[in-house]
Image (cartoon, coloured by chain):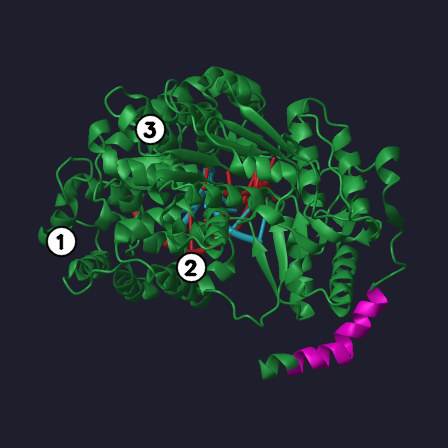
Chain colours: A green, B red, C cyan
Amino acid sequence: MFDDQLNPEQRLAATHGEGPLLIVAGAGTGKTTTLAARVTTLLERGVRPERVLLLTFSRRAAREMLDRAERAGHREAGRIWGGTFHAVANRLLRVHAQALGLSPGFTVLDQADGADVMNLLRDELGYAARTKRFPRKETLAQIHSRVVNAGEKLDTVVERHYPWCTDEVEGIREIFRGYTARKREQHTLDYDDLLLFWKALASAPATGPHVAAMFDHILVDEYQDTNAVQADILEAMRPEGTPRNLTVVGDDAQAIYGFRAATVHNILAFPERFPGTTIVKLERNYRSTAPILDLSNAVIAASAQRHEKSLWTERTGGVTPTLQACLDEAGQADAICRSVLGARERGTPLKHQAVLFRAAHHSDVLEVELLRRNIPFVKFGGLKFLEAAHVKDALAMLRVLENPHDEVAWFRVLQLPEGMGPASARAVMERIGVRRDDDLSPVVNLLDHPIEVPKGSGEGVQALRSALAGCLDEEVTTPAAQLERVRTYLEPVIARKYASAVARIADLDQLALVARGYERRGRFLAELTLDPPAASTDLAGPPSLDEDYLILSTIHSAKGLEWDAVSVIHATDGCIPSDMATGDEDELEEERRLLYVALTRARDELLLTYPQRYYKRQKPRDDVHMYAVVSRFLDTADVRAHLDERAPAIDVREDDVAAATGTASVDGYLADLFG
DNA sequence: CACGCTTATATTTTT
DNA sequence: TATAAGCGTG
């Protein structure tokens, strides 16, 4: 089917028969096409779709590949098991929960929830009240995740990655022990548990062979960003002595998830771990023009220890990438706007252009400028929506109904009524038996029995009760209907507790919109946690076809994507590499690969910008500023040879003043009126 | 014990 | 830019 569209290496990979296969696929070498073609080939050979497992980094990626297979004439491709390791673990564990001693109705904690559980423990164990500073809950969650995913001892991890916490390691240990116990009591699993229990399921003599036999073929995308536990899972799913039909695709030059304990070792050592591996290298780049590829190659050339490969392209010609120095962030925003609008004039729609940056907040100034100029955009990365307090409030209401032993959810819910604080919430939790292991009784206890609450909070607690009771109504079964009920309850609560209530309540409506796609509450909650909306548009539904918008994205979220024109902003030392990541050589190398990933997203045009001066924005009108220098990864002769360097524009601010007071602002005002 | 106020503090990347 | 911790009041 795909044969005429594939080059010889791609065809080799797509049509490979049995046994382990490693595809080393450089940036832009048609990795997705090849993997989709391989899926298609398998189906054509009669492999049943429900016996194929396709593990990707995001659900978006899985969907894209399965769509391609469907378009190639395989409508049954939708029956393939596709998704992230975590999402697949969730599905498998629901089925096999009992064999592992888990409750099949377990709920999933995201990292923030896990941090909240640790915070409860930190309070209870008395670490919060001490005078000496103790790691914050977010730090605790990070340390925990690193320990689990890397499979390293707590002491080693703290010593190597969190040296400032070494004095507190005993306290951390105590909290971690309590954390594990608490998760079991509550019937909750965190992200790390999902992987660990999958590994346990696949390794246990009783269940392992059964689970491994579910699939004839396993395919894994972005293998360079998997961690030790994930590699163990794959080995357990393809045990020796069985046909080890396992395809992994990756590029060690694009490994950017070391902070999540991903290890390049997985891809480098794959052939040893799976003897008899066939290796296919994809080196022909179809994406970028030669000047862009030359620059990318020059940046990554300085990187040690990687699979030998050299990308080449037939797309000769094209424009040399530009390195634009700007006076300050405002100048940078201006340069980006001009560049974006210029490209659009030349025929590149906004949708085919992207602005990339290291950290989510790096686009703040640019976003304001884009709004001012009426340039529509969508931002990916930065997990804002689910982290907003009011969204958590609404979800916590559903969570206590789904899993009445979920302590963190109760703790949040019980502090919603006026007059209820942490201490009263704890008392009520004790009273209704959140930590007693009997089904549903905590909810029933709250609804049916009189509970002592502080003076003045009686009315609020009663409102909460009727909201929860309303959700148990036989008519109100879908998550959307329950959210509707929750919204009615939360409206006055949000108005009392938070500023900008209107916007926050609008968020709840968006949440309800997502919920409409789900019949069952448990599934809604789990999928929301495992595959959170990546951008605001994910919530608003697909934008209409004629709608055009610029893409803003963190480099991490841009993985695997491509655009005609790409701008990378804040290309300074301090941003790329991040100041936080210059500690050791490995971290620094990861930052270099991050820049490489950003550069290789571009097809035709590439613009790098950096502000020479930026203001430390501690206070709004602070005049304290610092001078920045260009990223060290760009500051070598080898790299500069591939860049067209531009000095800052003389002064953009006169222009800005004219724009703000002249036709632009009037026209913008009118455009706003016309909607 | 809750709540409102002030002040410190840290702010990478994401399943 | 928040959000978390610290402190005084009711």
Q: Chain of mark 1?
A: A
What span is in magenta? A653-670
Spatial CA distance of label 1 from label 2 is 27 Å
- Residue A55, by quadrant, is top left
Query: Can you tell which mark lies on residue A447?
Result: 1
Q: Amino acid type of disc 3?
A: Ala
User: Quick one: label 1 or label 2, which is nearer the N terminus?
Assistant: 1
Percent x, y for residue A167? 50, 18
Foreground tag (1 vs 2): 1
Q: Is residue A149 left or right of residue A462?
A: right
Q: Is residue A111 left or right of residue A303?
A: left
| Front residue (pair A187, A25) | A25
Labels 2 and 3 in the same subunit: yes
Q: Residue furthest left?
A: A449
Residue on which the image places disc 2: A498
**Earlier residue among tags 3 and 1:** 3
**Overall secondary structure of the magenta section:** helix
